[in-house]
């Protein structure tokens, strides 16, 4: 009995010591990370303070001092083993870093500020009659665009439809229509967030596939759910394809949308099982009729190999590449059909698409190809104007790597609104850090994912920081956006100390100004002129904020030129 008591006491002491050591290690890791964050926010401040008001400069310096003193105190308390006080100082440091970013952040005149609102939130807000509060909160934070999810995880939609099924509890309501009207009153544009091949989640097929099981996409083991228990439509079944197009176009005609966000425009994958989609009967029959063999009889190439950056299409022979290309074209052809249908109805509306990235390894393009999401071809064919890469990451370096990789491939043919995942971030201030980093790469917008993950602190940081002034979203008018951005550039450049650069930019601004109301041919000629002149004029720019705005201007001009090239 005595031995047992001693053993229990030993275990208790061991557990307490282990927890203490773990806490110490966590505090030390926090201090290390916060010291790095302090260096980054200092560098950001130094690069931009020449364009800041005196009051914001002084406020930033005050918060920087608070960060430094709090970190020093935290180290002292940690050395004294006063872990309670150390933790308080660490939390104070995090708060002060957030405030530093708020005061040092730039609020731009031209930018798409997108928030994703999920269908579950829309349903709950409609039922509680609080949609006006939702839109007010979004407007107050400085957003100018909403990507609203229209299909819930249970497979029901949030609007009355002749094709899809309205969620039973929403009978008599139109949450989507109400959101569109409320947003319009606040000058917020709405894009329907269409999950193209998605049918339902949570291990269910949803109401549509329950009625039409022949439309279900199947993996190569003939299972109808992916690794995350999602059900998908077969991209090959003609009736399923027709149904998808019909319900999307029905909504497009019914509501006043500014554009359309296409998501789940790919096949499902089960990479941990070395498995992918879709091997449903419609896919197998159509492929066999075209190529004369059954892809299920082919040796399956490892997912690990196919997602590596060094993987080259063709490495597994012609028969596999035929199957890969066939599945890619099934996806691409539906994107093309949707794009044509939507743009025939609203020629000026832009289409955005969510694309997969290599957040957890592999190559950026290879991860997309693995899902038969050949988005570079969509750019080749002028199907979409906006790319929204899914970069849900806590690590800023990974976010930047993926955005840069997408930018290199897009090569001026599309804007990027990277989807920044709040749910992946450890601290609210990281959202501001990622927004500013995306801006520095020359991207004219970003998507914040998603409303349910945003806390009061996030909304406050955005309202007081990078979204504090209203911005014009480029998708509304690329030409006008370019003109407004040139105006902003001129405010950043001194007419006294940078006289030559100022005069050159003033000349470019006038070139756009006289063609603001001109026809497409004259506007196109003006854009071509600017694209030719801008690199020479700005080649010696060293100011970081001016450099950022020049990059963003080049992006807008390049996308305008590419979008209208085949028309001219």
Image (cartoon, rainbow, N blue to C red):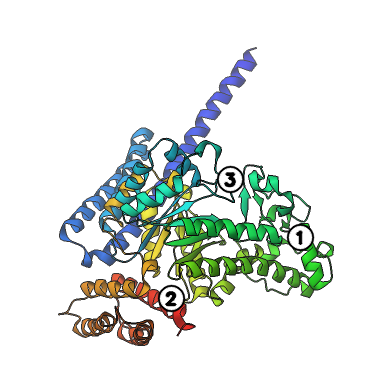
Relative depth, front residue between 540 and 284: 284
Q: Nearer the viewer, residue 531 or 88?
A: 531
- Within 10 angstroms of label 2, few (less than 14), some, or many (20 or more) residues? many
Distance CA(mark 3)–CA(mark 1): 25 Å
**Front label number (2 vs 3):** 3
Q: Mark 2 points at which residue?
A: 559
In which quarter of the view is residue 467 placed?
Answer: bottom left
Callout in the foreground (3, 1): 3
Q: Could you classify mark 1 by the number of other residues whose Cα lies within 10 Å: few (under 14), some (14-19), or many (20 or more)?
A: some
Q: Quadrant of residue 521?
A: bottom left
Percent from the top left, x then y, of residue 20? 47, 34
Q: In this orientation, does residue 264 appear?
A: no
Place of residue 477 in the rendered image (x, y in percent of width and height, measured from the top left):
36, 70
Tell me which residue sits at (37%, 73%) in the image.
478
Q: Give the side of residue 47 with respect to residue 382, left or right.
A: left
Q: Quadrant of the N terminus?
A: top right
| Near-viewer residue (187 or 242) | 242
- Mark 3 lies on residue: 165
Q: Taking 74 as reference, is 357 above or below it?
A: below
Which of disc 1 and disc 3 is earlier in sequence? 3
Question: SS at mark 1?
Answer: helix
How far apart in space, not on screen, are marks 2 and 3 (Cα)? 38 Å
Numbered circle sitting on residue 282? 1
Helix, strand or loop at disc 3?
loop
Nearer the camera: disc 1 or disc 2: 1
């Amino acid at each position: 009995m005595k031995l047992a008591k001693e053993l229990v006491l030993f275990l208790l002491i061991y557990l307490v010591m282990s927890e203490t050591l773990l806490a110490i290690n966590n505090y030390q890791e926090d201090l290390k990370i916060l010291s790095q964050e302090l260096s980054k926010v200092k560098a950001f401040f130094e690069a931009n303070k020449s364009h800041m008001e005196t009051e914001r400069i002084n406020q930033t310096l005050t918060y920087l001092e608070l960060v430094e003193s709090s970190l020093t105190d935290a180290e002292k308390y940690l050395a004294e083993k006063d872990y309670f006080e150390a933790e308080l100082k660490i939390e104070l440091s995090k708060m002060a870093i957030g405030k530093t970013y708020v005061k040092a952040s730039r609020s731009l005149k031209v930018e798409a500020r997108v928030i994703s609102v999920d269908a579950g939130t829309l349903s709950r807000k409609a039922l509680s009659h609080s949609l006006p509060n939702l839109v007010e909160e979004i407007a107050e934070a400085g957003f100018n665009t909403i990507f609203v999810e229209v299909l819930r995880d249970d497979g029901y939609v949030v609007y009355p439809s002749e094709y899809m099924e309205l969620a039973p509890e929403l009978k008599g309501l139109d949450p989507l229509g109400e959101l569109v009207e409320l947003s319009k009153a606040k000058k917020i544009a709405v894009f329907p967030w269409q999950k193209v091949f998605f049918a339902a989640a949570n291990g269910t097929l949803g109401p549509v596939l329950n009625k039409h099981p022949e439309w279900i996409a199947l993996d190569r083991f003939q299972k109808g759910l992916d690794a995350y228990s999602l059900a998908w439509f077969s991209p090959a079944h003609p009736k399923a394809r027709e149904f998808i197009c019909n319900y999307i176009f029905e909504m497009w005609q019914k509501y006043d949308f500014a554009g359309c966000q296409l998501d789940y425009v790919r096949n499902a994958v089960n990479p941990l099982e070395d498995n992918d989609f879709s091997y449903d009967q419609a896919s197998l029959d159509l492929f066999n009729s075209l190529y004369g063999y059954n892809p299920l009889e082919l040796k399956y190439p490892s997912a690990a190999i196919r997602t590596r950056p060094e993987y080259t299409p063709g490495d597994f022979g012609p028969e596999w590449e035929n199957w890969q290309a066939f599945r890619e074209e099934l996806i691409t052809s539906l994107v093309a059909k949707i794009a044509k249908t939507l743009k025939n109805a609203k020629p000026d509306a832009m289409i955005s698409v969510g694309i997969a990235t290599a957040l957890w390894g592999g190559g950026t393009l290879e991860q997309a190809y693995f899902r038969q999401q050949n988005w570079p071809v969509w750019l080749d064919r002028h199907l979409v104007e906006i790319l929204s890469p899914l970069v849900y990451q806590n690590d800023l370096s990974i976010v930047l790597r993926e955005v840069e990789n997408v930018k290199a491939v897009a090569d001026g043919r599309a804007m990027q609104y990277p989807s920044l995942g709040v749910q992946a971030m450890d601290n609210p201030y990281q959202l501001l850090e990622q927004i500013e980093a995306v801006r520095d790469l020359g991207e004219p917008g970003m998507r914040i994912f998603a409303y349910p993950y945003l806390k009061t602190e996030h909304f406050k940081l955005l309202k007081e920081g990078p979204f504090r002034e209203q911005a014009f979203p480029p998708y509304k008018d690329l030409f006008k956006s370019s003109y407004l951005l040139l105006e902003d550039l001129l405010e950043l450049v001194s007419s006294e100390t940078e006289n030559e650069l100022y005069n050159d930019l003033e000349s470019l601004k006038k070139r756009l100004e006289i063609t603001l109301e001109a026809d497409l041919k004259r506007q196109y000629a003006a854009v071509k002129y600017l694209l030719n002149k801008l690199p020479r004029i700005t080649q010696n720019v060293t100011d970081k904020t001016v450099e950022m705005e020049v990059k963003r201007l080049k992006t807008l001009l390049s996308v305008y030129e590419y979008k209208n090239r085949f028309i001219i």
